[in-house]
Structures are given as C-alpha cells and as structure tokens.
Image (tube, grey):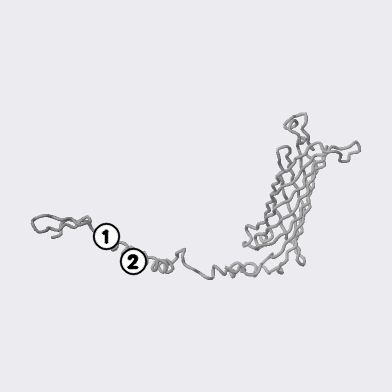
Amino acid sequence: MLLGGSGMRHKKAQGGHVVSMRRSPARRMAPRLTFGSLFLGVALFVAPSAFAAAPGSGATFDESNVNYDPGPPLRRGGFAMGLSQGLGYGTYTGYPLEVAALNDPDAKQSTGPALASQFNLWMGAALRDFLTFGLGVSLMSTQGKQVGGDFAFLIHLEAYPFFYKGGFFRDFGISIDGGLGVGVILERDDDGKPGDPVAEGGAMSNLGVGAFWEPLRFWHFSAGPLVSYVYGFSQTMQAHQGVVGFRFVFYGNQPKKQSKTAEAIAPVLRF
C-alpha cells in the first residue's frame, strides 16, 4: 500500500512493518522539465507571431520604414559651403597668461567696447532641407584702445525650424557654432598699430548663435543678411561680440524656385 506524499513512498510489508522508499530526484524532476520545456518552446514559437499580428505593436516589421526615402530636396541639399562677413561691436577683457596675474586688477587688460569684425568659413552638407551641418573656422577682432582677436575651429549647425510653413520660412534659419580657439589682446604702439601681447586667453571655448535669411538665389548660391553673437571664454579671458553682416552659401543641389502654389502643396505630397 502507498501512503503519504512529498516524494516518499510507504509500503506496508508483511508482518505489519512499514517500509519507506524515497523517490529518485531525477524521476521527480523529469515531468517538470518535460512540461517546462514544452511550455517554453510553445511560447517562443507563438510570441513572435502574436506581436507581429498585434495592430500598432512596436514589434511589427515594416519594410517601408527601413527603406524610407525622403525624396529630392525642395530648397537645398548635398554638399554645402558658406562664408560670412560682419561688422558690429565687441569687447575683450583678460589677464597675462601667468598665475600671479590672474584676477589681479592691476594686470587686467581690456579693449573696451569698440568696432568689431568677424569672418566665418565652413563646409559640410545640407542633410535635409531644414538641417545643415559643417566644420569651419572663425576669425574675430575688436579695434578699441587695445586690439582683441580670436581664431577658432568650429562645429557649425544650421536649422530651418519652420521650413514646411513655406514662403519666407524656407529661407529663414538659425545657426549654432561651438569650438575651440585662441584669444589675445595686443597693446597699441605709439603710432596706433597693434604691438605686443598684454593678455592671452590660452585655449578659449567659443559659443555662437545667429539668425539669417537667404532669399537671393543664383546658380548654386544663396545669399542674404545675418545677425550673430559670439561669447569666448577661458580662465584668463572673456570676449563678447555681436555683428550684422552678409552670407554666401554654395549648395550642391539647389532646385529652381517653385511657384507659390507648388510650394504650398509640396509638403502634402511628400507626406
């Protein structure tokens, strides 16, 4: 006779004695492993099909998304290279590149607010009609009671946030520049010409923002006015400069200007 459970088998032998026999662990686990393996196999087989069939499921594979084609550019595309020149006001303040001179009021040098100029050159690509990326250089100067200057290597980014509104907004963009350069303040000689350095910025960080409009088109070029502000800083120098200027940009792909009707329906046809 079998009595109890919990892996124990009890058999009543002749003479009234009960003999206990323990079930083998392997034999106890065998059914569990069999049913567990079966359940896992069914789950792995059914789950992918269930997810793929679920409407709106993130697991649904759509080949059109993988092979997405944004279509030909409407305004700008391909290789891009730009240059700009501006005039405005700026000021440089700094100290000699010496530990003892840092933050010493007697060693502080400044150009004072004065006429400033800025030249930028960059090249890259118009990734989309509304996004352009490039690398470039910037040269700035301020001509005050002393002469301040800054030369920097930049990462250049342009965006046209309202491009698909059409019209004016297809040519209106904002720019962001960030990079690393060197800055210096030069004293003026008796004849007014730049002389020896009186303050140095060492490795200066440069951050710039701007806005522009490029309504003029001819061949692969676009042109128009801009405004920009640049802040340069390091432990020993600070520079502020704002300018108004003009820019020229070459686009490898610049379609002909569309009529207002075609321009209005282009975003609808694309999407």
* Residue pointed to by mark 1: 28
Residue name at image x 36 percent, y 64 percent: 40
When the figure is inspected, residue 262 is found, relative to residue 205, above or below; the finding is: below
When the figure is inspected, residue 176 is found, relative to residue 34, above or below; the finding is: above
Q: Position of residue 13 (x, y in %)?
A: 11, 58
Q: Position of residue 70 (x, y in %)?
A: 61, 67
Q: What mark, if any, has residue 38 been given in the picture? A: 2
Distance from label 1 to label 2 (Cα)?
Answer: 17 Å
> Can you tell which quarter of the image residue 200 is in?
top right
* Neighbour tally class for label 1: few under 14, some 14-19, many 20 plus, Cα within 10 Å: few
Query: Looking at the image, is mark 1 or mark 2 nearer the viewer?
Result: 1
The amino acid on which the numbered mark 1 sits, given as a three-letter code, is Arg
Work out whether residue 249 or residue 17 is closer to the camera in this orientation and state it. 17
Q: Position of residue 68 (x, y in %)?
A: 57, 68
The amino acid on which the numbered mark 2 sits, given as a three-letter code, is Leu
Residue name at image x 78 percent, y 51 percent: 119
Q: Quadrant of the N terminus?
A: bottom left
